[in-house]
Amino acid sequence: MQKQLANWGNYPAVTCDEQAFSQDDQLQAVVAQHDAIIARGNGRCYGDASLAVHSISTLKYDKVLDFDVQHGYLTCQSGITLDQVLEIIVPKGWFLPVTPGTKNITIGGAIASDVHGKNHHVDGAFSRHVTWVDVLTADGQTIRCSHTENTDLFWATCGGMGLTGVITVVKFDLKKIETAYIKQTQIKAKNLDEVIRLFEEYKHYTYSVAWIDCLQKGDAFGRSILIVGEHATTADLSPKQAEHPLQLPKKSQLTMPFNLPEFVLNTFTVKAFNWLYYGKNFKREITNVVPYEPFFYPLDAILHWNRGYGKSGFVQYQFVLPMDQQSGLVTILKRISDKGWGSFLAVLKVFGQQHDLISFPMEGYTLALDFPVRKGLFEFLDELDELVLQHKGRLYLSKDARMKQEIFWKSYPDAKRFQEIVQRYDPKGKFRSIQSDRLLLTKPQ
Ligand SMILES: Cc1cc2nc3c(=O)[nH]c(=O)nc-3n(C[C@H](O)[C@H](O)[C@H](O)COP(=O)(O)OP(=O)(O)OC[C@H]3O[C@@H](n4cnc5c(N)ncnc54)[C@H](O)[C@@H]3O)c2cc1C
């Protein structure tokens, strides 16, 4: 069915023929029938990675096939969302090994982007926890791959943005929890130097993230709140919480009803940040026990918050720089804050080591912030790309909607090897997206 599709950034919006499937034979038929096809999960990548002439929605292919409650393994179809998985595993005392900042993505999307969470420095990216993946490749065969079997296909599939084929069934491991709560500590940092020092000081925590106020200048440049946390034990809970330690948090009811002018979202985030920064008696450090939802998924509390950026949409700019390039972080953040076009808040996380084929993370710091689409924006982001490159960093494909192919090829050192593996499994380039054509990972038709 032809329809207008866009992912989370609402940019670009394109006309695609979208098909769905719930059975393996239906999937095989759709893949055999079409060229220029790409799998689409829940459309939570920001740009054009799951858009193509033909997209194939995995959302109805969402069954749990096996849940080993004793050892903590889940085997499921790729269209199930993290939200659906959490509803099944949390009451039984298990959690996702790695989760991004939204639970509204599919397991297929988690592998194809090789997503990272607030625990990358401890637990790595999602691929580290995958036992095996089945991939339907271009010739109609389903191939099982893993850390030890068909490893080239495995590493080209993790972070490979759907270009090796459609991920069908996945087995991955889970994290044991005693409660559905997080014991979190929020620490105020006066500026960027201090927050980097704090990341180092608090690196023994499993989870960490900092929200940076991009409006401050001078000594307060990079004023932030660092939030660190651990899964709470039953001993950490209040008597009320302890009545049902593994109870799922209540679902949010708020919805962004329609597209808003851009300033509305910024005013909202300014207020939220100031409330956190100046609230709670001005204490520098606050510890409390909260349900896992506000800790991991604060943005999911407002459904469709992306509409807050208005009709033209927005792009999220996320880059990573290696550990020894922190000066680049200052340069880039200053450039963004001087321009005044970015969102008020930026999210900073630390990554541990990762040397995979095409996944985004590398040991260092990653910064993400939103830019509403406007005249001149892409030229400005091209300038930032050059700075990222000068500092030996790279951009996250899952957030990208506009990067030039030269930047991609210079910043992903194993891109050629990745492309060779993709071509081996898909010599005619059946699986392709608007993004892969733009980056010349596939040949534009
Ligand atoms: C609010 C928000 C916060 C986020 N926070 C983070 C974060 O902290 N860390 C992080 O890493 N990411 C984050 N993301 C990005 C998101 O996790 C990824 O873009 C994820 O891949 C989206 O999954 P999806 O199911 O929506 O897939 P889509 O967005 O539809 O597709 C994403 C990619 O996966 C491919 N794909 C999807 N399903 C399959 C399949 N079955 N087989 C083969 N390929 C497939 C698509 O072709 C595409 O290349 C965030 C996104 C949002 C909106």
Image (cartoon, rainbow, N blue to C red):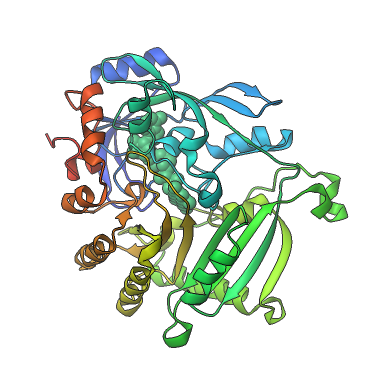
Q: Quadrant of the N terminus?
A: top left
Q: Quadrant of residue 429?
A: top left
* Whether residue 400 is situated above or below residue 369 in the rendered picture: above
Near-viewer residue (404 or 360)? 360
Q: Position of residue 200 (x, y in %)?
A: 54, 65
Q: Position of residue 236 (x, y in %)?
A: 80, 54
Q: Does residue 173 lie above or below 25 as drawn?
A: below
Seen as rendered, the residue at the extreme bottom is 218
- Residue at the front extreme? 324
Residue 275 image point, x, y percent: 61, 75
Which quarter of the figure has residue 103? top right
Closer to the camera in the image, 41 or 164: 164
Horizontal and vertical percent for residue 56? 34, 29
Q: Is residue 32 above or below residue 274?
A: above
Which residue is more in the foreground, 147 or 270? 147
Q: Residue 257: tell me if it is visible.
A: no
Q: Going by the image, does 250 lie left or right of 112?
A: right
Residue at image location 47% in from the left, 26% down from the top = 60
Residue positioned 84% across, 56% down in the render = 238
37 w.r.t. 440: above or below: above
Q: Is residue 128 left or right of residue 384?
A: right
On screen, residue 231 versus residue 346, left or right, reads right
The C terminus appears in which quarter of the rendering?
top left
